[in-house]
Each structure stands twice: as structure tokens, then as C-alpha cells.
Image (cartoon, grey):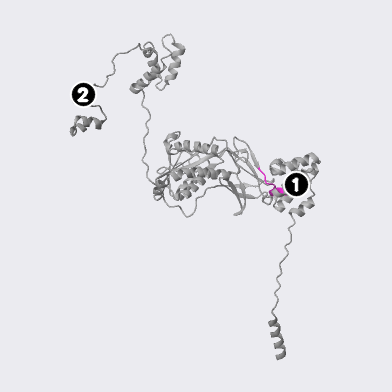
Amino acid sequence: MDYRKSHTQTLAAAKAGLSERTARRIDSQAHQPAAQKRPWRTRQDPLTDVWEPIVLPLLNQIPDLPAIDIFDHLCEFHADKFDTRARRTLERRVNHWRQLHGPDLPVIFPQEHIPGQQGIADFTVVDTPITIAGEAAPHRLFHYRLTYSGWAYAEPVWGGESYTALASGLSRAYQASGGVPKEQRTDSLSAAYKNRQEQDDFTDNYEQFCKHYQIKATRNNRGQAHENGSIESPNGHLKPRLHRALQIRGSFDFESREAYGQFVAQIVARHNRQIASVFKAEQRQLQPLPVAASVNYTEQNVRVSRTSTIAFKRVTYSVPSRLKSARVLLRAFDDRLELYCNGTHTVTLKRLFARNQQRLHSVNYRHLIESLVKKPRALRHYRWRDELIPEGDYQHIWRWLEQHHDPDRACYLMVRLLHLAHKSDQEQALGRYVLAQLEQSQFPCLIQCEKRFLDQPVAIPEINVNQHPLSQYNALITQEVAA
């Protein structure tokens, strides 16, 4: 009709994509009206006998009862009144009743995000069967996002949702993004909140963390995970992307935790490159980083036992024997433990995490070997012998010694071998050498091993001799004649 105002009937019809006959009917107002829905039924209603006496009471009693459950109920107890082929009719009728008489449904309220205003963080369990050096490695991912640009940071967490994991993850995320948002949002983590009252229930550590970075901490209502949709939904995207990337890689095994962490960082970096322009706009609105990082550890005073071990979170760690019976300060980071004796850093231990109420032991032979050399028989029934002997070559050597020597001799040789590995600092090379000798059914001479791995070759000094020119001798003769 718009074309008809300024064009002929034929040209207007062509421009509108209509035939001339249709155009003539439109001009004469004789075109066919839209078909009206017929007011009568073409077949008998299959729900006549069950809708009011059975279905409606169920819907009034249980408004959210699924239609499939109503269908199963009718098929089981009222098959004589109900046609089992009318499932779709029942579902449409139930859906129509709910639209007219059902309860109110939850509504999504789109949020407007401000650049640099909010960062959001969460922990999510990874179900993909990751292995580290062939061993199962259950873990979580710490996931952080800027809500405006969607810039993300993620790293593996091998323990629980602790304060050290939260603080370490947030600190590294702030460092990677180049700034700090004005507001940090999480769920009701026990690492950050005491969860005993509605307001002002921060843990002391998290409160200090927020003051250090000058951020305002917020959280969703307890049990309402959908309120953190800006991180919950990305969690559901990140883990499938990680799983598909591992499938393309062709292996779920990694040499070390660090290698797996780098792989996760690569997956997140792909996403960040896609939103680089938006992130740059938000990055300019972030608060500057403080001069120093915040405290991302917890402290605890522990006593070293007479077995030269300490216990922390259901894990027993060996420490250098010189610390026996000492009281030391333990700083627990997410990936390590640091021990301070009288304010001086003494030793760093790799942190282990005990799961499901189990107990673990981390025993380093280097901490105990000097005492063990004085009483090698103690190795035979040592409670943590399997943890003390290094895995791999040395475990094979120990089993060979048990089979070919009496217990005392086997303990003596094993302790001497570990002592040599400690003094030479060539544990792997020594283990491979001894294992190669055992393949020839003979244990190498310990004296020869000491000469091979302990004695350092003496470097022969280079002596440079300078030949004086003859002119210098003529000067001496001249001086003698003058005298």
C-alpha cells in the first residue's frame, strides 16, 4: 500500500513481490481475510472424564507437580477413564492452566554492570579425571571474573576452599588484571565469613585482606547460588572447554601440577583475547594495586616432636632433626608450608591435603638420615619407611635388597645408599647407576660409588708463562755498566 501511493498498480505489486491479481484484489478490498480459528471441536475431548474430578485437585494441591507425573498417575489408577495416547494433550492443558491460574514464576532481572565496579570469585569442582605423573589428582578451580568485561582468571586448587586458596587466587588475579575492583563478591565461603549472623561477620583474615586492597566485600544470600550468575554460568562454560581441550590434547596426564596450571591458564587466555578491547576499557577504571601483596597465609605455632615431625591438617611432615623439640612458627600457604625458628626462615615444605578424613605422611630422608646412619636397623620396622624411601628407583632397590640379603644387611646397605645420595646431592643419578648394576644381579661396591659420586675431580690450574723480551736484559746490562 505504501508503494501504491506513488506508483501504478503493476509497479507497486512488483516492488511488493505480489502478483497483479492480488494487487487488484487489495485495491478493491476483495482480498481474502485471515482464516479464523474454528470455535468447535473436531473430536471428543480425551480429558473430559479426568480433568475436573482428578487433575484439577492435584494441581490445586501441588501447583508445581510435573505433567508427566500426572500422566503416570492417570495411566496407573484411571486407565478406564483416560486415553493413554493423550499425553501431549494433557501437557498442553496443564501448561495452559498454569499460565492462567498457576503460581508466580521466578523472573530473571538483567543487571547493568559498571566498568571496574565488581569482581566476582568462586570455587568449582572439576570432575574431569586429571592425573599428575599417573596418579589421580582431584582438585577444584579458583575462578575470578570482572563482571563488566568478562575478563577471567583461573588456577587449580589442590586443597579445600580455604582462606589461603582464596587470598592467593585473588592476589594473583588482581596482579594479572593490573588492578583491583571496587567491590569483591563471593558466596558465603567459610574462609571469608563466619556465617553466624547476617552482617559484619567477616573472618579476621578476610577483613584485613579487604582493607589492604581497599575493596568492599559482598556476598549472595545463603543457598541462593543463582544470585551469583555472573560466575556460576561461566563455571559451566569453563569446565566443558577444559574437558574438550584435554580431549584434543589426547591425554589427561601431566608431568606436574605446574604444567597443568599452565594448561588451564592457556585455556583462559583464549577467552580473554576475545574480549581484549572491552577489558582495556574496564582496566582503566580499576583501582591501582597496592605496593605490597596482602597476607595470603595463616600462622600457627607448632612443637616439633621427638620423631622430628610436625602435624598439620591431618598430615605429618618431617623436618630437619636439629629442630627436634623446638617450638616453631608455621606459615601455611596454599601450596607450601614455611617454618620459622626464632624469627628466621628455616625450611619450606610442599603442602599435602588429606581428603575424606584420611591421614597422610610426608617424610624426607634428608631430614633424618644423619640419625638413621647411627642406627640403620631402625629402618626395618620404621613406621613411615615407605614414605622415607624415595619412590621409583630406590623402592625397586629396597625390594631387591630384601630378597637377596638378610634384614640387617639390607637395612645397612639402604641407609648407606641414602646417606651417599644426601651427601653427593645426586639422588637420581645414583639411583639409576645402582639399578643398572642390579640388573646384572650384583649390588655395587659402596666405596666405588663414593668415589664415583662423592669425590670431585681436582681441577688442574692453568699456568701462563710470559717470556720477557731481550730488550729488558739489555736494560739490565746498561744499569750494571753504569754502576
Give the residue pinned by disc 1.
Answer: 434
Q: Is residue 451 above or below residue 62?
A: below
Give the residue pinned by disc 2.
Answer: 25
Q: Main secondary structure of the magenta part?
A: helix
Name the residue nearer the viewer: 216 or 307: 216
Judge whether residue 368 is colored magenta. Answer: yes
Badge count: 2
Q: Which mark is residue 315?
A: none
Name the residue nearer the viewer: 131 or 62: 131
* Element type where label 1 sits in the image: helix
Left or right side of 18 for 247: right
* Element type where label 2 sits in the image: helix
User: Amino acid type of disc 1?
Assistant: Val
Left or right side of 112 for 320: right
Which marked residue is nearer to the observer: mark 2 or mark 1? 2
Tell me residue 245's x, y (percent): 52, 39
Residue 206 in sight in this render: yes
Judge whether residue 57 is colored magenta. Answer: no
